[in-house]
Image (cartoon, rainbow, N blue to C red):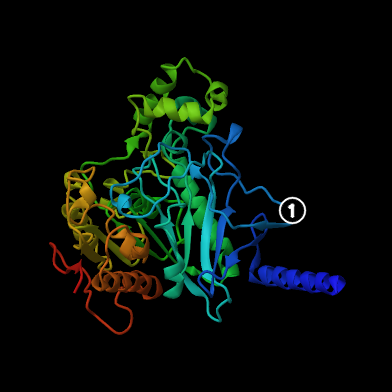
Amino acid sequence: MKKKYLISLLAAFMAVSFQASAQEKIYEVDGGKIAGVSGRPSGITVFKAIPYAAPPVGELRWKAPQPVQPWQGIKHCDRFPPTPMQRERNYNAFQDYKMPVYECYSEDCLYLNVWAPTQKPEKPMPVMVWYYGGGFQVGSTVYPLYNGENFVKHGVIMVSINYRVGVFGFLSHPLLSKENGGTSGNYGFYDQLAGLQWVVRNIAKFGGDPNNITIFGQSAGSMSVQALMCSPLTKGLFQKAIMQSGAGIRQNVRCFPLKEHEQYGKEFFDAMGITTLKQMRAMDAIELQKAYQSSKFFGKFRPSTDGKFLTHDSNKEANFLGLYPDIPYIIGYTKDDVPAANMPKTVMDWADNHLEMGRKAPYVYSFDHALPGGDMGGRAKDIFGATGAIHSVELGYMFGRLNISTREMTPADYELSNRMMEYWTNFAKYGNPNGLNSNAWQPYQAHGQNIFHIDIK
């Protein structure tokens, strides 16, 4: 009897093991074989922390991303990557969502995540590539808000890309420029580029269409999209773009000229008595981050006109000169977005200039809905001095993540969320947020005409 019981137990274990292995989808990508996790929800597989470049540590600190290091066997991509080195911080809007505190910060952060259908589709699917915000100082793909499951449900494969920020991602320095043929900085942008190139090379394995890629981002992620648009290095890598609350022709933000940016970096390290690249790269990552955020230079290591990735200020000159592709665009803001940035004017100036160059009319929106409750969750104002439909408020609706909100959501909120996901995924499919059966959202017309207001009905 005991022997029969052990045989039955072993058979049951093998059945469970077979079922678990059957849930894994295995693909061969740059570097080797990877396995994803499927079954939650059914029909969707997520591949977490796929390496797209070598770890930017040691001698690779402050260098453009290098080719991924191959691995043996199958890499099980079942945990999100570390958060890039940065100061701990959450957006005000994120405080209204169940966002756990993450303690895993690392320079070894160049990974991306893919949400795809478990069964490879008969026809290649559109692809959306997400770039997070955070002022180029914070941000990560690990935030539960940035989940791509609902995009797959709407017929789109989604990818999110980790990139370096702050002193690790945007430092310029004369010694780095000398080492690199006369230019330095913008390593975070090179990360974004390398991740996008990985998508073009590999996404067909997951059922995605490498010739139908939409890049999208919010806040600094939106500015990143604008930089990718304006860079001479990204030609042909994407076919559509969405810019949320950050991009446009901005007067309050600029890309630092390289020489000015190099001087900031030199003064920062000189103040610590560090004068060689060897010393700079030997500095402990945690101590370097602490030194940066306690210095007068905190916030200054951000995008610059390095002469290679960006030849012009992407916030101004590159747009006036039309140094970006004539493709379908969505651009917009929230109704009470960062008051000092004057987002409506920023966006309209960009859209008007776009039309004056004889280009396809973009789709322009204002997200007008504030989170239900109306009390800012006990806060008087957000960090930008606003109330109402504040900066980042649309993210929970766009990703369909209202279920993790701490607010009491109404059926109207869920309807708005589903509608917004349809706008974004329709745009990825057709270059038109309406899809094929509506013309409710009209393309922009000069001087603020046809700004589409996204709100509950």
In the image: residue 446, left or right of residue 8: left
Outermost front residue:
1
Outermost bottom residue:
437
The one nearer the camera, 327 or 95, is: 95
Above/below status of 127 relative to 307: below
> Residue 299 at x, y = what percent?
34, 34
In the image: residue 18, left or right of residue 115: right
Q: Quadrant of the C terminus?
A: bottom left
Outermost top residue:
273
> Residue 94 at x, y = what percent?
33, 51
Judge the density around disc 1: few (<14), some (14-19), many (≥20) Cα neighbours within 10 Å.
Answer: few
> Residue 165 at x, y = what percent?
43, 40
> Residue 294 at x, y = what percent?
37, 25
The one nearer the camera, 308 or 341, is: 341
Residue 214 image-quadrant placement: bottom left
Kindly identify the residue that appears in the image at 48 percent across and 49 percent down: 162
Kindly identify the residue that appears in the image at 57 percent across and 23 percent down: 278
Above/below status of 111 relative to 295: below
User: Label 1 is placed on what type of residue?
Assistant: Gln
Q: Which residue is mark 1?
A: 72
In the image: residue 314, left or right of residue 201: left
Mark 1 lies on a secondary structure that is: loop
Count of numbered tags: 1
Kindly identify the residue that appears in the image at 49 percent across and 74 percent down: 125
Q: Quadrant of the N terminus?
A: bottom right
The one nearer the camera, 310 or 43, is: 43
Kindly identify the residue that appears in the image at 40 percent across and 50 percent down: 231
